[in-house]
Image (tube, grey):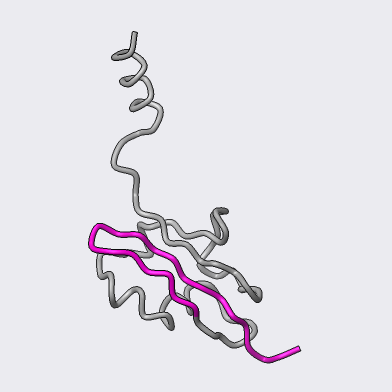
Amino acid sequence: MTDYLQVSVAYVGERGQVLRAIEVARGTRLEEALHQSGVLERFPEIDLARNKVGVFGKLAKLDQVLEDGDRIEIYRPLIADPKAARKRRAAGAG
């Protein structure tokens, strides 16, 4: 067992996208890894108080301890309510 883990950070924004692999110390929390990755500096529109985060598509808390191989994902806020958008599309198709 090593003292370090390999994790990645993924984000798709309006100004580009990133998938960055980083090495973090065992016991590192999700928020710490985000800061270490440099993604927050590259994409200043990310607000951890507003943007949700997850690991492999499952919502996660910023204080979650990471495991080797985890992929941290930063989600953008929804622009439109998905249910309302489906209703509009269905109404237009009928």
Q: Quadrant of residue 78?
A: top left
Give the residue furthest to the right: 1
The magenta stretch is: 1-21
Q: Position of residue 11 (x, y in %)?
A: 39, 63
Q: Position of residue 74 (x, y in %)?
A: 42, 61
Q: Quadrant of residue 75?
A: bottom left
Give the residue furthest to the top: 94
Q: Position of residue 26 (x, y in %)?
A: 64, 85
Count of marks placed on residues:
0
Closer to the camera in the image, 44 or 23:
23
Q: Quadrant of residue 68?
A: bottom right
Residue at image point 47% right, 62% down: 73
Residue at image point 65% right, 74% down: 67
Give the residue furthest to the bottom: 3
- Look at the picture and state if 91 lies above or below 62: above
Overall secondary structure of the magenta section: strand
Q: Position of residue 14 (x, y in %)?
A: 25, 57
Q: Quadrant of the C terminus?
A: top left
- Look at the picture and state if 14 lies above or below 81: below
Residue 15 part of the magenta segment: yes
Q: Quadrant of the N terminus?
A: bottom right
Residue 3 part of the magenta segment: yes
Residue at image point 55% right, 59% down: 60
